[in-house]
Image (cartoon, rainbow, N blue to C red):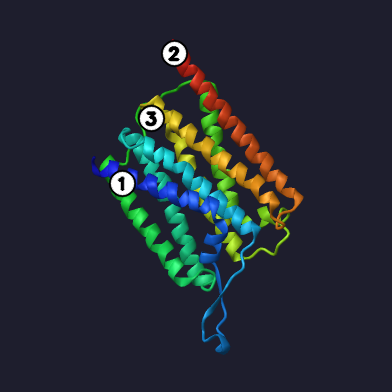
Amino acid sequence: MGLVNWALTFDAIFAAVSGVALYLFPDKFGDFCFVSYLFCLYLNNSFQQKETDGVHWHLIRCIGGQIFASCLVSVKFRNSSHTSQSVLHFIRLIPSILILMLVFQIQSVTPTLVEPNTLKFFKYLMVSTIALHVTLLSVAGWRTGTKLAAGNRFGNFLYQLDALASICIGTCWMTFPKWLLHRQVLVNLDESHEFLGRVMGANFIASYIVATHVLHWESQQDRNVAVDGRVICCISILVAQFWSQKYPSWSGNHWVGIGLFSTWTVISVIYRICLTISRKGKKE
């Protein structure tokens, strides 16, 4: 087992464990991450835990779903071509750089938002991830594709539609998360909600690179895995949206987001079914 195989195996295990933990226990992570410092003589300069709410838990659960979905791609791509693996490295590299910028922004603007040791852990994790995947990209020669596999027009359209949705939705969450949330929730939003929304947006933005390069991969199996990853991601977020309805923090307007992700999920599932039927047809 070579360096790349080991790295992708570790990446898959880390993504699976951390993704499931965030998805199932978002309240625990929120309580661990966000604190409100009270520099008070009576408290001996200690800090008081910030109370997280259903909006925090929903956003954390969505991030967990995004991370967990990527573990499938890491597992499947361990023995794939360098061109496919390079795109996977970019999926890790792009959000790591964006989240590192968010960490620096918190340090400068709202230094008491996240517990210092937790913030330091995020910083070192992002730096380590960037260094690892830059190294792996160098090994792969920074190639993200070869000759274009034109495929059919329906497939091309859906891949590019996926890229468009990833960029637009991700950029909106990175730019104005409070605006996207304000009519959907019944709590006062602060910087902690913005931070989680922007992390989710960073992951969405990074996923565009799969759809834009998938038609340049040599393997049809790798292209199928790309669709599988999107299906798992969409279903995870859609379930999280329904799950969040039991929290009193959300208003009835959350159904707008549910409608959007229902559409994205249905399109992804239909295309995956079409690929399966097409593959069986060719075998016969």
Q: Which type of secondary structure does the marked residue at label 1 adopt?
A: helix
Residue drawn at x 61%, y 53% as measured from the top left:
58
Q: Are marks 1 and 2 in contact (CB under 8 Å)?
A: no
Give the position of the C terminus as an image quadrant: top left
* Along the viewing direction, whichever of 284 and 264 lies nearer the viewer: 284
For disc 3, the neighbor class at 10 Å (few under 14, some 14 to 19, many from 20) is: many
* Residue identifier under label 2: 282
Separation (CA) of disc 1 from disc 2: 34 Å
Mark 2 or 3, nearer chain start: 3
In the depicted structure, whether residue 195 falls above or below residue 223 = below
Instruction: Judge from the rendering whether residue 84 lies leftward or rightward of residue 40; answer left or right.
Output: left
Q: Which type of secondary structure does the marked residue at label 2 adopt?
A: helix
Q: Which type of secondary structure does the marked residue at label 3 adopt?
A: loop
User: In the image, what residue type sits under mark 3?
Assistant: Trp
- Which residue lies most toward the right here? 252
Instruction: Give residue 35's position: percent from left, percent from top.
Output: 55, 71
Instruction: Give residue 118's position: percent from left, percent from top.
Output: 45, 66
In the depicted structure, whether residue 40 falls above or below residue 280 = below
Numbered badge on residue 69: none
For disc 2, the neighbor class at 10 Å (few under 14, some 14 to 19, many from 20) is: few
Numbered badge on residue 7: 1
Instruction: Give residue 83's position: percent from left, percent from top.
Output: 34, 35
Mark 1 or 2, nearer chain start: 1
- Which residue lies most toward the top here? 284
Instruction: Judge from the rendering whether residue 166 lies leftward or rightward of residue 263; answer left or right.
Output: left
User: In the image, what residue type sits under mark 1?
Assistant: Ala
Which numbered disc, 2 or 3, marks the residue closer to the eye? Answer: 2
Residue drawn at x 46%, y 16% as measured from the top left:
280
Residue drawn at x 33%, y 43% as measured from the top left:
9
Numbered badge on residue 217: 3
Mark 3 or 1, nearer chain start: 1
